[in-house]
Amino acid sequence: MTIHVRYYSRGGNTKKLAECIAKAAGVQAQAKAIDSGSAETEQADILFLGASVYWGGIDNNVKAYIDQLDPQKVKKVAVFSTSALAQRAMPDIRKRLEKKGIPVADENFYCRGEFAALHKGHPDKEDLKAAEKFAREVLRK
């Protein structure tokens, strides 16, 4: 099984989750940041895609990344996200992926991320354990 872990993170919160998910997924998976020029050119049985919510939505870099995904190469996407406020990236990402014909795993992971004085220390050890558990559940199915 080919597994990729990709993420976009301004403050490092989503990066922490991506690294834990990659570790749980095994040595063939390495967490890589996406940016405005990122493109997924390799086959992926499972693509773990991480994003943060900024000002009520996902970053344009994530939108551009999703737009360039090839449904013939990406078999399934599992979404994980962080935010300082109670809003998940999952609904927007799911809508965009399904519009492209890319299946989205039912399981998704979300936790609070530290921002300014909010949620100091998050993602914390418990959040990271939960992210690893999420990855193992996705891979088990």
Image (cartoon, rainbow, N blue to C red):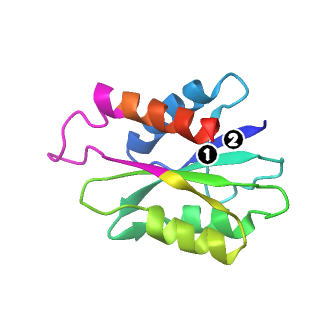
User: What residue range appears in magenta?
Assistant: 108-127
Q: Position of residue 8 (x, y in %)?
A: 52, 51
Distance, label 2 to label 1, CA atoms, is 6 Å
Which quadrant holds the C terminus?
Answer: top right
The image quadrant of residue 136 is: top right
- Left or right: residue 81 versus residue 61 is left
Q: Outermost residue toward the left?
A: 117
- Left or right: residue 31 versus residue 9 is right
Q: Position of residue 14 (x, y in %)?
A: 44, 44
Identity of the residue drawn at 14% across and 45% down: 117
Task: Decide: is 118 above or below 53.
Answer: above
Dot 1 lies on which element? strand
Crowd band around label 1 with a 10 angstrom C-alpha radius: few (<14), some (14–19), many (20+): many
- Left or right: residue 31 versus residue 81 is right
* Identity, as a three-letter code, of the amino acid under mark 1: Arg
Identity of the residue drawn at 59% across and 31% down: 22
Q: Which mark is residue 18?
A: none
Q: Which residue is mark 2?
A: 4
Residue 123 magenta-highlighted: yes
* Identity, as a three-letter code, of the amino acid under mark 2: His
Identity of the residue drawn at 79% across and 64% down: 71
Q: Position of residue 11 (x, y in %)?
A: 37, 45
Residue 30 magenta-highlighted: no
Q: Position of residue 125 (x, y in %)?
A: 31, 25
The image quadrant of residue 66 is: bottom right
Q: Outermost residue toward the bottom?
A: 99
Which quadrant holds the N terminus?
Answer: top right
Q: Which residue is mark 1?
A: 6
Task: Decide: is 119 above or below 28.
Answer: below
Of 46 and 37, nearer the camera is 46
Discs 2, 1 touching: Cβ within 8 Å: yes
